[in-house]
Image: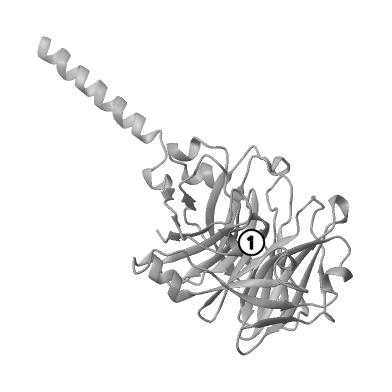
Amino acid sequence: MKSKVVVLALLILTAAILVGACSHPPATRIASTERSLTLIPMDGPITSKKAELSGLAWHGDMLILLPQYPERFGQNDGVLFAIPKSAILNYLDGKSQDPITPTTIRLSAPGLKESIHGFEGYEAIGFSGENVYLTIESGKNAKMMGYLVEGKVSADQSELQINTSQVVKIPPPVLLDNRTDEALIVMGDRVLTFFEANGAQVNSSPAAHVFGLDLSPQGTLSFPNLEYRVTDATLGPDGQIWVINHFSPKDTDLLTSSDPLAEKYGKKSPQQQYPQVERLVALKDNPSGITLAGSAPLEFELAKEPRNWEGLVALDRRGFLLVTDKSPDTLLAFVPLP
């Protein structure tokens, strides 16, 4: 009798374990993995918080770092900063541990800032050969407006000249203070710009704006409801569009009761210690529009103080480079691909 009781108890325990296992989502759904960041030290004026870096792009093998307010550096319209790819690779490969001092590129945009009412600086940058494209933010509250401009890079990369006679408006889909098209990519013969706030509760019909290389408007593409902020974009080595997806506790207008990506892929306990969100999300460009790629976000290992990531580029097939604005400092970082 005692042996039968033991066998029965084991059967009940086994059944309970099986039922419990079946009541939870498959382990593959909890696929989010935090990635550690490697900070790349810099030196010179760029390390000042007043740099407020807002975008990154490659021009050949030169990394271009865009300050939101270039006029804060140099004379007239100011400067952008540049770092050769070789210097970044040497640091990451352990060939050098010295801080990198960027060179500067003069910006020539006579009268542009004065011609845009409520000018709030440059937000994104991208290149197609010698052509350069930048978005600009302006206004406050219900008078927000985005703009797209283009220009040329000199043959010796010493100057970037903006065509100030052609300034294209990008009306925001919803009026939120300090929110315009903050991300930009160049895909073949198209320039795509992305609005900063695309969450379901603040933007019911998000869309990417499409322009020709001559800045001719070419309509819009549907864009997924992606919570929090989209602050920059880049084409990854796999051809997917990767975007910075960021949330800081100060972004009270973007608070949400539901984060579908976190609910689908989960977060490990270190992520749950802090209220901020710092991650990269992969998207796909389809004939019907831009959609989520269906992969887990690339979550960053978080620090106690939120980092406001504003610029993003792919680094070959290794991973991505990112920069912050002034929060908490001017930071250049590398994050590897999964």
Task: Identify residue for label 1.
Answer: 53
Label 1: few (<14), some (14–19) or many (≥20) C-alpha neighbours in 10 Å: many
Depicted 64 relative to depicted 282: above or below = below
**Label 1 amino acid?**
Leu
Where is residue 188 shown, x and y percent of the image? Answer: 61, 81
In this rendered view, identify the residue nearer to me: 271 or 204. 271
Colour scheme used in the picture? one colour
In this rendered view, identify the residue nearer to me: 132 or 84. 84
Q: Decide if residue 61 is on the left or right side of residue 197.
A: left
Looking at the figure, which quarter contains the C terminus? Answer: bottom left
Residue at the image point whose x is 13% and y is 15% from the top: 4
Q: Classify residue 89 by image quadrant.
A: bottom left
Where is residue 132 shown, x and y percent of the image? Answer: 67, 79
Q: Decide if residue 113 is on the left or right side of residue 325.
A: right
Residue 295 in view, yes or no: yes
Where is residue 118 shown, x and y percent of the image? Answer: 86, 60
Where is residue 213 shown, x and y percent of the image? Answer: 70, 82
Residue at the image point whose x is 70% and y is 53% from the top: 197
Q: How many numbered discs?
A: 1
In this rendered view, identify the residue nearer to me: 310 or 105. 105
Looking at the figure, which quarter contains the N terminus? Answer: top left
Depicted 84 relative to depicted 283: above or below = below
| Name of the residue lying farthest toward the top | 1
In this rendered view, identify the residue nearer to me: 244 or 257. 244
Residue 1 in view, yes or no: no
Residue at the image point whose x is 28% and y is 27% from the top: 15
Q: Decide if residue 187 is on the left or right side of residue 78.
A: left
Q: Classify residue 221 by image quadrant.
A: bottom right
Task: Say what secondary structure mark 1 lies in.
Answer: strand
